[in-house]
Image (cartoon, rainbow, N blue to C red):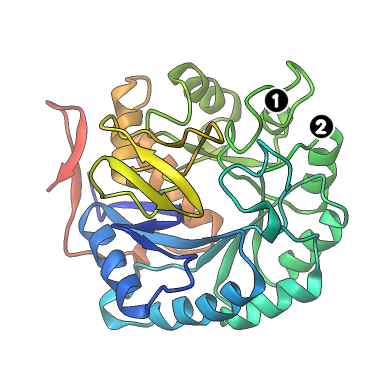
Amino acid sequence: MKIPGFIDLQVNGYINVDYSDASLTEKDFIRSAKALHENGTAGFLPTVITSHEEIYRRNLPMLARAMKDPDLEGCVLGLHLEGPFISDQPGAVGAHNPAAVSKPDCDYLKRMFDWADGQIKVLTIAAEAEGAEKLIACANSLGIAVSLGHHLATPADIEKCAAAGARLLTHLGNGCPNMIHRHNNPIWAGLADDQLTAMIITDGHHLPNTLIKTIIRAKGLDKVIVTSDASPLAGMPPGRYCTLGNNAVLEPSGLLHNPEKQCLVGSSATILVCANYLASLDFLSPDDIVKLAFSNPLKMIGVAESSINSKTQYQWNPGTKQFVRA
């Protein structure tokens, strides 16, 4: 079995290139995308996190243009907007800037869709936000898959949004306060809703192994997508940085966090690293992992597997129990 690499629906940046930064250039984006591709990411969605309107107006057209670069053909598959329609509450907002959070606004979404030349494939919103159901209908009419996350949603909120057409859960198990109600919380509610596919970060830091196993077994292989949530510091050496508006520490272990906020700041992993960490847990077959990190994400955004081409191929090494270059 050979594959061209894995598919990542949530990449905030790479090698110190931040896709939400006011100084992002097309040249730097292309450089980072090529580097991702060389490290096992066959296709991905550049992700712009919660930002003020001027960032969307500036960066979305730039990213849409860069997608057409011949060197990136078949690699950049669209865009993911993680916000701005999320919760502004501590814990739920995570590493995002609460001052940039907006209430659901269909006209605003349509402007962003136009700035992005129609390339928005995934939109993360808070399920409890006023007007969420209307926004979901608007996004669906534009062909955007709505994901629920960075919220303090009740089970009723999640049920309403799923019924309205939401399809995904953004990094289930993360993007919520460290202390939540033991029963009535967004994790259990999202896990229980059979209409929603759970995206999970399997980098070894975002979720304990027991929860990874529980989510996959509860949801089933058809309803889970592995993602990296790679931060701009993915691919960088350990140290102290300022990234995504946070004073962050990248530990030698790969843990990337803001000690003051006591939250993670995305991951330092690529999707290949996440796939191989999942393989190390030794409860899924190589074919299962390919489904979670290649087939399922492509299906969610309506991209054919045959359209993903790469000069580099990856295969399962039964000796090391890892995916490696063929």
Secondary structure found at label 1: helix
Residue topped by disc 1: 188
Q: Amino acid at mark 1?
A: Trp
Above or below, 314 relative to 306: above
Rendered location of residue 299, percent (x, y) = 51, 55
When the figure is inspected, residue 219 is found, relative to residue 62, above or below; the finding is above
For residue 66, what is the image quadrant? bottom left
Calculate the distance from the C-alpha at mark 1 to the C-alpha at mark 2: 8 Å
Q: Residue at x 37, y 20 (%)?
A: 283
How far across and how far down the image is residue 8, in percent? 42, 52
Above-or-below relation of 183 to 232 = above
Instruction: Give the label on residue 174, or none.
Output: none
Q: Position of residue 29 (x, y in %)?
A: 35, 71
> Are circles 1 and 2 on residues that touch, CB within 8 Å?
yes
Along the line of sight, the residue nearer the viewer: 310 or 131: 131
Residue 306 falls in image quadrant = bottom left
Image position, residue 15 (x, y; %) = 28, 57
| Residue positioned 45% across, 45% down in the render | 247
Q: Residues within 10 Å of mark 1 (few under 14, many from 20)?
A: some
Q: Which residue is mark 2?
A: 155
Q: What amino acid is at disc 2?
A: Pro
How busy is the neighbourhood of tag 2: few (under 14 within 10 Å), some, or many (20 plus)? many
**Residue at disc 2, secondary structure:** helix
Q: Nearer the viewer, residue 181 or 300?
A: 181
Locate residue 91: give its quadrant: top right
**Location of residue 36 with respect to 216 vertically, above or below:** below
Judged left or right of residue 274, residue 238 is left
**202 left or right of 140 in image:** left
Q: Residue at x 14, y 27 (%)?
A: 320
Q: Earlier in the sequence, mark 1 or mark 2?
A: 2
The quadrant of the image that shows the N terminus is top left
Residue at figure coordinates x 49%, y 48% from the top left: 246
